[in-house]
Amino acid sequence: MGIRTGAQYRESLRDGRSIYVNGERVKDVTTYPPFQGVVDTIASLYDLQHQPTQQPPLTYPSPKDSQPVGLSFLMADSVEDVERRVRAEEFRAEMTCGLMGRMPDFMNALVTDAAIAAPFIGQREPRFGENTLRYYEACRDADWCLTHTLVDPQIDRSKGPAEQRDPEAALHVVRETDNGIVVSGARMLSTLAPFSNELWVGPFYPRKPGEEAYTLCFAVPMDTPGLKFICREAYNTGRSRFDRPLSYRFDEEDALAIFDTVEVPWERVFINGDIEASNYILGRAPGYALLQAVIRGTVKLRFMAGLACTVAEAIGRTKAQHVQAQLGELVANVEIANGLLKAAAHNVVTNHKEGGSLRSLAASLWVFIPQAQMRAAEVIRQVSGSGLIMTPTEGDLQNPEIAPYLERYLQGKSLSARNRVQLFKLAWDMLGEQFGSRQLQYEWFYAGDPTFTRSRFYHSPAVKGYKAMVERILDEGKSGG
Ligand SMILES: Cc1cc2nc3c(=O)[nH]c(=O)nc-3n(C[C@H](O)[C@H](O)[C@H](O)COP(=O)(O)OP(=O)(O)OC[C@H]3O[C@@H](n4cnc5c(N)ncnc54)[C@H](O)[C@@H]3O)c2cc1C
């Protein structure tokens, strides 16, 4: 037990799971061509933990048997511990340029959050709190890769799951047995599903009385009978790494999770009908998962700022002051994100020890990072011009009849045509291809409905203090002068 190698991870995916892509069941996700790049990427992250220079910063000894386990499971006691977590997660996010939202660190952090909230989860039925803690230990010691699914199918969002035309569409409990609960229905979205070992089903939207059957938190292995995943179209379809440098390696996939009479053993059930536990669990956790997401988002902003600068330099555009100002704005946004990240890390410690708020984490995630990413994408488009579109394929560059033309007309300021085309293809994959479009959609929605989440800041107690300043000036004006 303890950290796994890439080879062990790969082998663990060959378990007969039900994964469908493009109308067909994928027999082995590790050999299915569109998935190979991302399996390689995740396997390489597992291997990194075994490198003698990387093992100390990426792991800590398991409290169970002292074997090294992933640092994203660490329950931090101090700011130094949180900083260790940040360094490890930042390092891994850099390996993927922040482009894989659900790399294993995210769910490692979420099950750690849940384990810290275990006493709250077990308030009504202590066994569920104990199950939550034991599941965290199992994930930590087996180094599983997890996917998760939180939201009901998007059928009619004006109504709760019980009021839908088909009240059995959303995942719900069908019956309880001596062994566990039997569930059916669907959950909307599960990123990384084909590449995971376990599915964690959790709460998200607040549940209300009458929705107990839909109020669930549990985990099951991916090959559980009755569990099926229907994936969206894969973005890495038969193009070379030169042509699709990002889709090729980082397309983490998204899938509809279907539960066709799935039995979940009691020891894997964490919430069953407890509305209070479901609605408040995340507020009782230190916020490690949010912190991981802020780290990853910040790394992505750094990558996009770097991409914008490299593109502008490649075509000799950086002499213009307005271009420098656009690029400078992106770099300044990275500085803001770096600052929010530091504040967020301290916030996690405060929250853990004193039950403080997660406001700076949430502000980074729900408001700043998506906005900054949109702006970075806009600037890359603006500085690129036609270069973003005029990107012949690797095949074109290999054809001796046309290659000399391309080499002459598509070179950059001080780049060969091949290197310039490669750079612009990277930029287009980041913005324009299916992969890039999803990146924007992901950043807006992965942490919930952005309209709803932003509106929560309006209700922040801090607003009272802001308004008091305005009232003071108005009052001072009333007294004349
Ligand atoms: C790429 C991607 C990856 C994701 N990965 C995961 C994952 O791994 N696991 C997971 O659990 N979830 C995942 N999600 C799902 C994510 O949790 C949801 O997208 C998010 O919670 C928002 O829910 P929704 O998509 O159902 O949108 P909705 O809640 O249906 O919102 C759609 C739009 O309707 C608007 N709206 C809401 N209420 C009203 C109203 N009353 N009147 C008018 N408009 C309204 C919203 O503001 C929003 O603009 C992912 C999403 C994306 C896009």
Image (cartoon, rainbow, N blue to C red):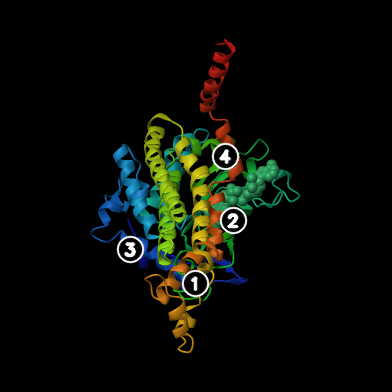
Task: Give how far apart the Cα atoms at labels 4 and 3 are.
Answer: 39 Å
Front in this rendered view, residue 338 or 165: 338
Q: Earlier in the sequence, mark 4 or mark 3?
A: 3
Distance between mark 3 and mark 1 Cα atoms: 21 Å
Ligand 1 has an atom within 8 Å of the beta carbon of the residue at disc 1: no
Q: Residue furthest right?
A: 165
Q: Give the residue at the far left of this rendering.
A: 52
Residue annotated with mark 1: 28
Which mark is on residue 261? none
Quadrant in the rendering for residue 74: top left
Q: Amino acid at mark 2?
A: Val
Badge 4 is on which residue?
454
Q: Amino acid at mark 4?
A: Arg
Marks 1 and 4, how far apart in space? 41 Å
- Looking at the rendered structure, the secondary structure element under dot 4 is helix
Callout 3 touching callout 1 (CB < 8 Å): no
Q: CA distance from mark 1 to mark 2?
A: 22 Å
- Residue 365 seen from this side: yes
Q: CA distance from mark 4 to mark 2?
A: 36 Å
Tell me if 169 is positioned left or right of 418 in this view. right
Look at discs 1 and 4 and give the one toward the viewer: 4
Q: Is residue 326 above or below residue 162?
A: below
Circles 1 and 2 in contact, beta carbons < 8 Å: no
Say what amino acid the circle numbered 1 marks. Answer: Asp
- Label 3 element class: helix
Q: Which label sits on residue 262?
A: 2
Q: Position of residue 50 (x, y in %)?
A: 28, 61
